[in-house]
Image (cartoon, rainbow, N blue to C red):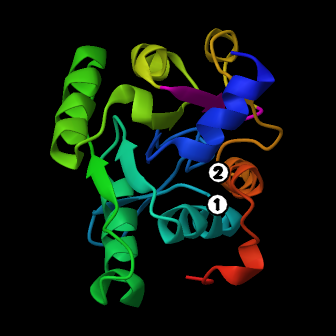
């Protein structure tokens, strides 16, 4: 896809599909066991990406996390959907499809979300970083990968971002969208 076609897509896409590990989170995982024996999982991410997500939601982009993981992604989406901006109706809730272990399940599940949201693959941008994103990225209208995305995905991505997954890649993408649409982020809400 040439630069003009990418710019056109940045101006017009309506849905953003995101992978979890390697895009929202860094891909690193820390585990601890509490005294009661319960294990907890911690995954680092950058708050700049949260603001980037807010910018996308503020301009009406529908958001879907499609991921093989469960927690802590489910908790993150629950927290996002309990923000006053969602409770007041100013922002649409963020959607999540979790525990998508098989690639065919991911495509089918995202396809179901698209139907529910009255979107097509062509209407959506997809940010992915590794093999489990390949089939979905082949269908999306615009694709991007973090700077540390894997070579298989870099070969097919329309945009290779500078920032790493979980380290500002979503914010970088959001700023590209705002620039393409002529929107100053200072005019958008902080959360």
In-front residue for pair 95/59: 59
Q: Residue at x 40, y 53 (%)?
A: 63
Q: Tag on residue 34?
A: none
> Where are the magenta residues, as a range?
141-147
Residue 23 magenta-drawn? Answer: no
Q: Earlier in the sequence, mark 2 or mark 1?
A: 1
Disc number at residue 170?
A: 2
Q: Are marks 2 and 1 in contact (CB under 8 Å)?
A: yes
Residue 28 visible in rendering: no
Which residue is rendered at x = 75% and y = 60% of the image?
182
Q: Which residue is mark 1?
A: 49
- Residue 68 image point, x, y percent: 34, 34
Q: Is residue 104 left or right of residue 61?
A: left
Q: Judge whether 24 appears above or below 111 on screen.
A: below
Residue 55 in sight from this viewpoint: yes
Give me the residue at 23% from left, 48% from top: 117
What's the distance in space between the residues labelled 2 and 1, CA to CA?
5 Å
Q: Quadrant of the C terminus?
A: bottom right
Horizontal and vertical percent position of residue 100? 26, 31
- Where residue 44 sits, quadrant-wise, is bottom right
| Percent coordinates x, y for residue 16 in the rendering | 46, 45
């Amino acid at each position: 896809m040439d630069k003009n076609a990418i710019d056109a897509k940045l101006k017009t896409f309506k849905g953003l599909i995101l992978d979890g590990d390697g895009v929202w989170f860094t891909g690193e995982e820390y585990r601890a066991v509490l005294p009661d024996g319960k294990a907890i999982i911690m995954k680092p991410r950058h708050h700049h990406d949260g603001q980037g997500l807010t910018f996308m939601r503020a301009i009406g982009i529908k958001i879907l996390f499609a991921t093989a993981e469960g927690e802590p992604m489910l908790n993150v989406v629950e927290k996002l959907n309990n923000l006053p901006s969602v409770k007041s109706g100013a922002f649409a809730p963020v959607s999540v499809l979790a525990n998508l272990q098989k690639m065919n399940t991911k495509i089918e599940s995202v396809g179901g979300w698209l139907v529910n949201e009255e979107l097509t693959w062509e209407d959506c941008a997809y940010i992915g970083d590794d093999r489990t994103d390949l089939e979905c990225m082949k269908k999306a209208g615009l694709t991007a990968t973090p700077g540390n995305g894997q070579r298989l995905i870099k070969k097919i991505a329309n945009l290779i971002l500078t920032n790493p997954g979980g380290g500002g890649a979503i914010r970088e993408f959001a700023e590209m969208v705002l620039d393409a649409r002529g929107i100053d982020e200072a005019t958008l809400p902080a959360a």
